[in-house]
Amino acid sequence: MTPAPENLERILFTEEQVSARIAEVAAEISDKYRGRDLKLIAVLKGSVFFLTALARAITIPLKIDFLAISSFGGPSRGPTPGLVRIAKDLDEPIHDEDVLLIEDIVDTGFTTRYLLQTLAGRGPRSLGICTLLDRSVRRIVQVPVDFRCFEIPDRFVVGCGLDHKQLYRNLGYIAVLDPERG
Ligand code: IMP
Ligand code: MG
């Protein structure tokens, strides 16, 4: 079903802007990881759209893997600290690989920090973070973001993999959801 546009307050980044920015970040990643064993790891489901767009724009060999987390959320948008667990683990080890964790959004930072700690314990050669959106104004725990496509204001957004009640992930643009009608 096509999501109803009247639920969206405004478009923050158009599909063209998103693709252009992803291409820039993909070029940076291709330069930085040339000659290394790059593996992109995405968290289901939100980051999958970004991962596929990014992977197609990267010009060096790479592998991909996925994990899924369950969060037992409190009242905030993201999970409550300590209440995240892995619901589906990676298929392959990451020992000695150059791992880039692909995120849809880094908000409070709790989810990303949990994932970083979990992955770091498995002995990757390097471990970086690449996020489509960074809402650093809401950060509670600090995480080192190596690559970011866009910094965003403190508004709830959907599209490019980000959902509201599992809807809107398939939008090609990033939009602010109207809190009255979302
Ligand atoms: P954090 O642990 O607070 O950084 O939360 C990150 C997670 O919260 C993301 O992976 C999203 O699933 C969700 N999230 C945070 N902000 C938004 C938003 O504006 N739209 C949709 N999902 C969001
Ligand atoms: Mg998510």
Image (tube, rainbow, N blue to C red):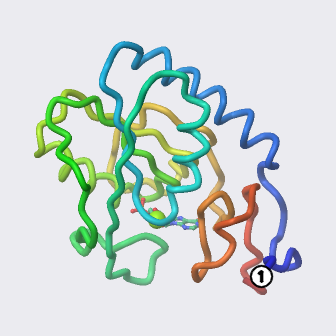
Q: Please tell me which residue is depicted at 49% across the width and 57% down the height of the picture.
A: 138
Residue 18 is situated, as x and y percent measured from the top left of the image, at 72, 43
Question: Label 1 is placed on what type of residue?
Answer: Met
Quarter of the rendering containing residue 165:
bottom right
Which residue lies at the image location 58% right of the left edge and 29% below the top edge? 25
* Residue 77 x/y as whole percent: 49, 73
Q: Is residue 46 above or below residue 164?
A: above
* Left or right of residue 25: residue 78: left
Above or below, 124 against 13 in this view is above
Task: Judge whether residue 139 can be spotted in this image.
Answer: yes
Identify the image quadrant of the N terminus.
bottom right
Q: Which of 36 and 182 is in front in this view?
A: 36
Queried on whether the Cβ of the residue with tag 1 lies below 8 angstroms from ligand 1, the answer reads: no
Q: Could you say which is closer to the camera, residue 94 or residue 77?
A: 94
Left or right, residue 98 beside residue 78: left
Q: Can residue 110 be seen in this view?
A: no
| Left or right of residue 46: residue 182 | right
26 displayed left or right of 98:
right
Callout 1 secondary element: loop
- Please, is residue 101 above or below residue 3 in the view? above
Pointer 1 residue: 1
